[in-house]
Amino acid sequence: MRDLCADARLLSLNTATLGPQRSLADAVEGCLRHGIGGISPWRDKIAATGLEAAEKLIRRSGLIVTGVCRGGHFPAADADGRARALADNRRAVDEAATLGAACLVMVVGGLPPGSKDLPGARRQVEDGLAATLEYARTQGVRIAIEPLHPAYAADRACVNTLAQALDICDRLGEGIGVAVDAYHVWWDPDLAAQIARAGKAGRLFAYHVCDWLVPTQDILNDRGMMGDGVIDLRSLRGLMEDAGYDGFCEVEIFSAATWWPRPVDAILATMVARGRSCV
Amino acid sequence: MRDLCADARLLSLNTATLGPQRSLADAVEGCLRHGIGGISPWRDKIAATGLEAAEKLIRRSGLIVTGVCRGGHFPAADADGRARALADNRRAVDEAATLGAACLVMVVGGLPPGSKDLPGARRQVEDGLAATLEYARTQGVRIAIEPLHPAYAADRACVNTLAQALDICDRLGEGIGVAVDAYHVWWDPDLAAQIARAGKAGRLFAYHVCDWLVPTQDILNDRGMMGDGVIDLRSLRGLMEDAGYDGFCEVEIFSAATWWPRPVDAILATMVARGRSCV
């Protein structure tokens, strides 16, 4: 395994970690102050800065863009909704291309309002991914499906295991892979085998870390700083690296009560320290 | 599929549905008033009544005991803790035998305090199940592993998919099967295949229903009444019955804010109505 103790260059900051009130500039400057080597912006932060200004800001910083969050949310109740989702995903591809991102991360979406048809939603997701992938290939953008924890199957993403995501990738071909997020996959009895499978197929595009707190107060916004929960992050990184992953460890922490209220430098100093000791 | 519209004889009341403040007698009498055919008591309710009195109460009622909840919680930090868990599971087997229960439901347990060793916890679970099964066979009690939603992997059960549970069953042999709970498995992309596999192997010992609410306010105690959430319960029962399941639909709803505060007859009348229209 790689040694992450020396510096923070292999860490990437997902802008969600700083909370909704911070700008892309806050994130970029924070990374530079703390020696963090990568950044993964959410699209609302890109939009608030402006795409061109965001590109310039990040390019001048020298930070590697480990992903853009996020495309997806394909399932819709009608054809208009599906068309809007596809158009938005093309814009997401364009943004990822402009920023030179390692991948466009896909949170694929859940059930359309009022629907209980999970297999139908999953078919819509695969159709949407196929269409977006076709366009992404022309722009040189890689698509990373992020399987989300089964707790989000209804309202955020109905791709819920690595096996399911990789089956989709196998059907769709080149240019699509997975973003492995420790929070979403740590419980999976099939985890080791599926990470190995993804590595063999060249589909490990991103690795996200945070921690699972016990108890979890809020299933969306109570994720833990690495080391504060129960995930064996060192072993998980071992699985990733054994499978050939040599990219960044992207820190993405949704924490409305614990971390977001803190000063940027307090969050980032802890992130860097825990990157050394726990990731 | 069987027609559940005519009466409620194929419904079973899991005592958790009435909330912690109600007794076993409340549950039994409620079932009789509402024409519900089965009951599945939690062990704290059996203990509060006394095992002998509980047996007499249920036998006189004519209710079928579709399960006893619960054995399990095998992983422990040390050998003493493991031995205590095994002893408690033998008592659970004895109670299930005394009540003539269709199965003893297993909530297998999660990580021991302070541990991050999920594979280790899973090994402890399998060892504990093997030891308990050996005893259960001598008492004529069937063991039903209940795979719990991955959100409970850390603190309640580290068996989180039907596939994982059935792999354990295959290794342990006769007398062990699964309790399929809609809340815990509805999201699983592999659900249809695994229910069919379980049916083929004669391992479908119980079927539990409730619903997944969007949003879910509390991951433990905010489960929905059938029809109030997003689970396609009719299709799920179809999968069960196609696989040969012909037992009860056991209603188990943990609902601290919505249902537990209501009068017993209001809960049961709704349960029976929804049993007809949604299950």
Image (tube, coloured by chain):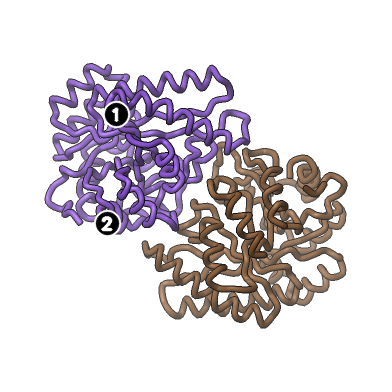
Chain colours: A purple, B brown
Q: In which quarter of the image is residue A68?
A: top left
How many marks the image carries: the answer is 2
Q: In this view, does B148 lie to the left or right of B112?
A: right
Pointers 2 and 1 within a single chain: yes
Numbered badge on residue A238: 2
Q: Distance between the residues labelled 2 and 1?
A: 27 Å
- Percent across and percent down for residue B99 are 75, 72
Residue found at x 39% / y 48%: A183
Specify the amino acid type for callout 1: Val
Q: Would you call the spot at circle 2 few (<14 residues within 10 Å), some (14-19), or many (20 or more)?
A: some
Counting residues from the start of the chain, the first of labels 2 and 1 encountered is 1
Chain hosting mark 2: A
Q: Mark 1 points at which residue?
A: A141
- Percent across and percent down for residue A173 are 37, 37
Local secondary structure at mark 2: helix
Numbered badge on residue B277: none
Q: In which quarter of the image is residue B213?
A: top right
- Percent across and percent down for residue B61 are 86, 65
Q: Is residue B76 left or right of residue A70?
A: right
* Of marks 2 and 1, the one in the foreground: 1
Residue found at x 76% / y 61%: B39
